[in-house]
C-alpha cells in the first residue's frame, strides 16, 4: 500500500511529487528487482516526511530537490539502488531533526556513511574557508566511497539549474565555486555532459551578457550549420556502408562556455570558429575490434575530405586519465569550412558521457589498471598525505589532479601521466622521493637536460642522480606538482636534520661568548626574528652560518632603540584587525569605504563587478568573470560583499585595449588624434609591434565607464585599416572582420 503524503503539501503538489517519483523510477537504469524498488520507495517516503515543512527559496516544496538529485544520479551517471537512496536522503541529517544514527538504523551503515560524507560542516570560527573545508570533506570520501563525490556532483548540478531564485551575490559565490572546483571534478571523473552543463551554467551567472550573446548566435546559425553538416556526413556514411562498417552519425553542439574559451584563446569572433558544431561517428563493434574500426572510419573520412594532419589527436592509443577514448580530426568540408570530427565506439561514447559508472560497467577482472585507476589512486594519496589546511588542500588537488595532462615514458617504456607544464624534477619526484632528492640532470630523448626542463607528451626521461646532491629550496621555483613540492619539503627537512648536532654546538658556543643562556626561550626569540617555525631550520641556519654571533647579539642584546624582535612583536600585536564580516556595502567614490580596483582585470563602472571584504584591508573590486575573482569566490564565498558602482564622474579608471590593424602610414596619428582631440581621453601607455603586414598595438588609457570605452571601441572599429579591437583581460572582446 502506498503511504499517504503529508497534508503540508497541497493536492497539486502531492500529485507532482508522485509524478517526479515515477520519473525517478523510469530514469533508473540498473537492476530494479522488487527488493530494490521497495528500499528506494522506503527512502523516498521517508525523505518526503522529513522535509515536509521545508520550502526552497523559489517557494517549491524542498523535496523536489532530493528527488531531482536522485534522478540525475540514476539517469545522467547511471548509479544504482544505494546511490539513489543516498541521494534522496542527502540533506536529511543537515536540514531536519533526523540523525546519522537514525539513517543507520533504518537504511544501514553503508548508506549512513555516504550521507555523512555529503553532510556539510556547520560554520566554524577557526575555519579560514568553510567552502574549502567542505570540498576537502567531499574529496576525502574518495578514500572509501566514490559515490559521495558522484552524488555531490548531482546535487551541485540541480542547484545550478535552480540558481535563478538566489540573490546575486549568492549566485556569484556558487557559480564561481562550480567553475573552479566542481566542473573540473566532473571532467576528471569522465562526466562530460555534467561537466559542460556546469560550466555553461557557471558562465550564465558570472558573465550573463556573454552567455546570452553566444547562445543567441548559436540559435541563429543552428539550422544552416546542421544542414551543412548533414550534407557533409552523407558521403562518409555512404562510404562506410559500402565498406561494411556499422556506424551512426551524431551532430553535437559545442557548449557556450567552450565556444567562449576558444574565442578568447584564438582571439576570433564566433563566425570564424569552425568547431562550434561537431560531427561524431560512432561504430558498433566488439571491444577487441574497436581500434581497427575507428581507424578504418578515419581512412574513409580522409578519403572523402582533406584533413589537417597536425590536428589529429589519438586519444585511443593514449586514453585520457578520466577514461576518455576517441579520435579527433579536422577536415575541409564541401562548403569551404573546417569541420571537427570525432570517431569512437559505442563503449567509448558511453564512457565519455557517463564516466566513472560506465567505465566500471565495462571493466573486466583481468584488465590492467587504466589512467582512471591511477588518477583515483593519486586522489586517495593526496587525501591521505600529510595534513594541510583546507585551502592548501584544494590548491594542491586542483594543481595535481585538475590540470591538463602529458604522457611521458620511463627508460623501460612505462607510461606516466603528469600535469601539463611538469619538469624533469617533477618526474623524478613522481618516481621516488630519493630519486628527486639526489637528481642532478636527466637524459630526455637521449639529450642531456637540466632539472627545470619542461616535459612534453612522448618524452622518454632518464634521471641522473648523485649521492653528493641534496634537496634545495630553489627547486620550488620550477616544480609544478603538489606531490613533488611536498616530497621536496620533506627532503629538505630530513637533510637539515643532519645538521642539528653541529648547529646545537655552534649555538652553545655563541651564547657562551655573549654570556647568555642557551635556553629555549632565547632560541625562540631569534626564531621569531627570523620568522622560523622549526627548530630544525634554526639549527641548520646556525650550522651553515646564516644565523651567526652578530645576528644573535642584535636580537638578544640590542644597543639602542627597539630591536628587530620588538618591532616584530609590535607588528604581530597591531596586525589583528576587526574580524567582523560586512554583510552589505555600497562602493562609491565618496570615500564611504576604501577600495582597491584590481589590476588583474581592471574593472570600470558599468562592468558586472564583485567585491570582497577581508579584515583590515580595503575592499577588493574585480570583474565578476575574472579568474582571480572566481578563485576567491570559490575559497572565500562568505567574504563577498553586495556592491554596486557609484563613482563620481571626474574619477577615471585604467583600461587596456589590443588593436590589430594593417601596417599603413598615418595609423598612429589617426589613433592618437581620436583619443586626445576627439574623445578627450588620457593615454597611459602605447606599445606597437609590426608583424609582417599587420600591426599589433596595446593601448592603456583612462576612461570613466564602460559606455565611454564602448564608444571608443566602436570608433576604432570604424577607422580605416583596423581589423580587430579587444579589451584585454576581458570577457567583452569586440571583433571586426573586414
Image: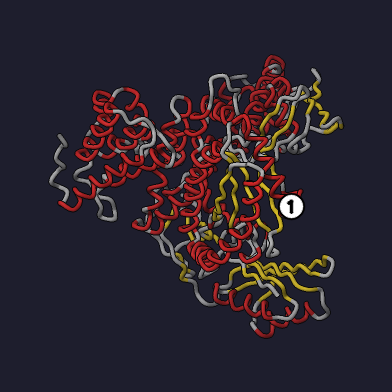
Q: Quadrant of residue 517?
A: top right
Q: Position of residue 395 (x, y in %)?
A: 56, 39
When the figure is inspected, residue 699 is found, relative to residue 22, above or below; the finding is below
Task: Name the outermost residue toward the front.
Answer: 242
Q: Position of residue 656 (x, y in %)?
A: 65, 67
Q: Quadrant of residue 337?
A: bottom right
User: Which residue sits at x=69%, y=70%?
Assistant: 724
Q: Which residue was labeled with disc 1?
A: 307
Question: Image quadrant for the C terminus?
Answer: bottom right
Q: How is the image coloured?
A: secondary structure
Q: Position of residue 248 (x, y in %)?
A: 56, 47
Task: Name the outermost residue toward the right.
Answer: 447
Q: Secondary structure at mark 1?
A: loop
Question: Depth check: 262 or 470 in front?
Answer: 262
Residue 396 visible in the current orientation:
no
Q: Position of residue 457 (x, y in %)?
A: 73, 37
Question: Depth check: 122 or 458 in front?
Answer: 458
Question: Image quadrant for the N terminus?
Answer: top left
In the visual, does 584 lie left or right of 58?
A: right
User: Which residue sits at x=33%, y=31%?
Assistant: 32
When the figure is inspected, residue 362 is found, relative to residue 631, above or below; the finding is above
Question: Depth check: 709 or 305 in front?
Answer: 305
Amino acid at each position: 500500500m502506498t503511504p499517504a503524503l503529508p497534508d503540508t503539501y497541497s493536492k497539486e503538489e502531492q500529485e507532482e511529487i508522485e509524478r517526479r517519483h515515477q520519473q525517478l523510477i523510469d530514469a533508473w537504469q540498473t537492476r530494479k528487482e522488487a527488493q530494490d524498488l521497495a528500499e528506494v520507495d522506503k527512502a523516498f517516503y521517508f525523505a518526503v516526511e522529513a522535509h515536509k515543512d521545508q520550502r526552497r527559496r523559489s517557494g517549491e516544496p524542498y523535496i523536489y530537490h532530493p528527488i531531482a538529485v536522485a534522478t540525475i544520479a540514476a539517469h545522467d551517471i547511471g548509479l544504482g539502488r544505494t546511490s539513489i537512496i543516498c541521494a534522496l536522503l542527502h540533506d536529511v541529517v543537515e536540514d531536519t531533526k533526523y540523525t546519522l544514527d537514525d539513517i543507520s538504523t533504518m537504511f544501514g551503515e553503508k548508506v549512513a556513511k555516504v550521507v555523512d560524507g555529503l553532510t556539510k560542516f556547520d560554520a566554524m570560527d577557526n575555519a579560514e574557508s568553510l567552502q574549502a573545508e567542505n570540498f576537502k570533506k567531499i574529496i576525502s570520501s574518495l578514500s572509501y566511497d566514490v559515490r559521495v563525490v558522484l552524488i555531490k556532483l548531482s546535487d551541485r548540478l540541480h542547484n545550478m539549474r535552480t540558481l535563478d531564485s538566489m540573490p546575486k551575490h549568492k549566485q556569484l559565490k556558487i557559480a564561481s565555486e562550480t567553475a573552479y572546483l566542481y566542473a573540473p571534478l566532473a571532467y576528471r571523473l569522465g562526466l562530460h555532459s555534467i561537466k559542460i552543463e556546469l560550466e555553461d551554467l557557471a558562465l550564465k551567472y558570472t558573465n550573463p551578457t556573454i552567455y546570452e550573446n553566444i547562445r543567441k548566435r548559436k540559435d541563429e546559425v543552428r539550422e544552416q550549420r546542421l544542414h551543412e553538416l548533414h550534407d557533409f556526413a552523407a558521403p562518409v556514411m555512404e562510404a562506410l556502408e559500402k565498406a561494411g562498417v556499422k556506424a551512426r552519425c551524431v551532430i553535437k553542439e559545442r557548449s557556450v562556455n567552450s565556444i567562449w574559451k576558444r574565442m578568447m584563446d584564438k582571439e576570433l569572433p564566433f563566425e570564424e570558429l569552425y568547431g562550434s558544431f561537431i560531427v561524431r561517428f560512432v561504430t558498433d563493434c566488439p571491444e577487441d575490434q574497436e581500434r581497427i574500426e575507428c581507424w578504418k572510419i578515419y581512412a574513409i573520412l580522409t578519403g572523402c575530405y582533406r584533413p589537417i594532419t597536425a590536428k589529429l589527436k589519438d586519444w585511443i592509443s593514449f586514453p585520457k586519465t578520466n577514461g576518455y577514448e576517441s579520435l579527433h580530426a579536422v577536415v575541409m568540408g564541401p562548403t569551404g569550412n573546417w569541420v571537427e570530427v570525432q570517431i569512437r565506439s559505442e563503449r567509448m561514447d558511453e564512457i565519455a558521457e557517463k564516466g566513472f559508472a560506465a567505465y566500471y560497467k565495462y571493466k573486466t577482472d583481468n584488465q590492467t589498471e587504466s589512467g582512471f585507476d591511477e588518477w583515483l589512486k593519486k586522489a586517495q594519496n593526496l587525501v591521505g598525505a600529510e595534513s594541510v589546511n583546507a585551502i592548501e588542500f584544494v590548491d594542491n588537488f586542483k594543481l595535481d589532479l585538475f590540470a591538463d595532462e602529458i604522457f611521458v615514458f620511463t627508460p623501460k617504456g612505462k607510461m606516466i601521466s603528469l600535469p601539463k607544464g611538469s619538469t624533469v624534477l617533477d618526474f623524478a619526484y613522481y618516481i621516488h622521493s630519493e630519486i628527486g632528492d639526489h637528481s642532478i640532470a636527466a637524459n630526455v630523448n637521449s639529450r642531456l637536460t637540466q632539472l627545470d626542463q619542461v616535459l612534453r607528451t612522448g618524452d622518454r626521461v632518464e634521471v641522473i642522480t648523485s649521492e653528493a646532491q641534496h634537496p634545495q629550496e630553489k627547486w620550488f621555483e620550477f616544480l609544478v606538482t603538489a606531490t613533488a613540492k611536498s616530497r621536496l619539503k620533506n627532503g629538505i627537512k630530513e637533510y637539515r636534520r643532519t645538521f642539528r648536532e653541529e648547529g646545537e654546538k655552534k649555538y652553545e658556543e655563541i651564547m657562551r661568548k655573549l654570556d647568555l643562556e642557551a635556553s629555549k626561550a632565547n632560541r625562540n626569540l631569534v626564531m621569531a626574528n627570523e620568522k622560523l617555525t622549526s627548530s630544525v631550520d634554526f639549527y641548520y641556519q646556525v650550522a651553515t652560518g646564516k644565523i651567526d654571533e652578530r645576528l644573535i647579539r642584535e636580537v638578544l642584546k640590542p644597543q639602542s632603540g627597539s630591536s628587530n624582535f620588538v618591532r616584530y612583536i609590535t607588528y604581530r600585536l597591531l596586525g589583528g584587525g576587526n574580524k567582523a564580516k560586512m554583510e552589505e556595502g555600497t562602493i562609491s567614490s565618496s570615500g564611504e569605504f576604501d577600495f582597491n580596483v584590481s589590476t588583474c582585470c581592471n574593472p570600470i563602472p558599468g562592468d558586472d563587478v564583485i567585491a570582497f571584504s577581508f579584515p583590515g584591508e580595503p575592499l577588493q573590486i574585480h570583474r565578476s568573470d575574472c579568474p582571480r575573482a572566481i578563485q576567491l569566490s570559490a575559497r572565500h564565498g562568505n567574504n563577498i560583499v553586495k556592491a554596486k558602482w557609484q563613482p563620481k564622474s571626474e574619477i577615471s579608471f585604467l583600461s587596456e585595449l589590443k588593436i590589430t590593424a594593417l601596417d599603413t602610414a598615418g595609423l598612429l596619428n589617426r589613433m592618437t588624434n581620436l583619443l586626445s582631440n576627439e574623445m578627450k581621453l588620457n593615454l597611459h601607455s602605447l606599445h606597437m609591434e609590426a608583424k609582417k603586414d599587420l600591426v599589433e598595438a596595446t593601448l592603456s588609457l583612462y576612461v570613466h565607464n564602460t559606455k565611454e570605452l564602448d564608444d571608443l571601441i566602436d570608433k576604432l572599429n570604424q577607422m580605416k585599416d583596423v581589423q580587430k579591437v579587444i579589451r584585454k583581460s576581458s570577457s567583452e572582446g569586440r571583433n571586426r572582420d573586414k
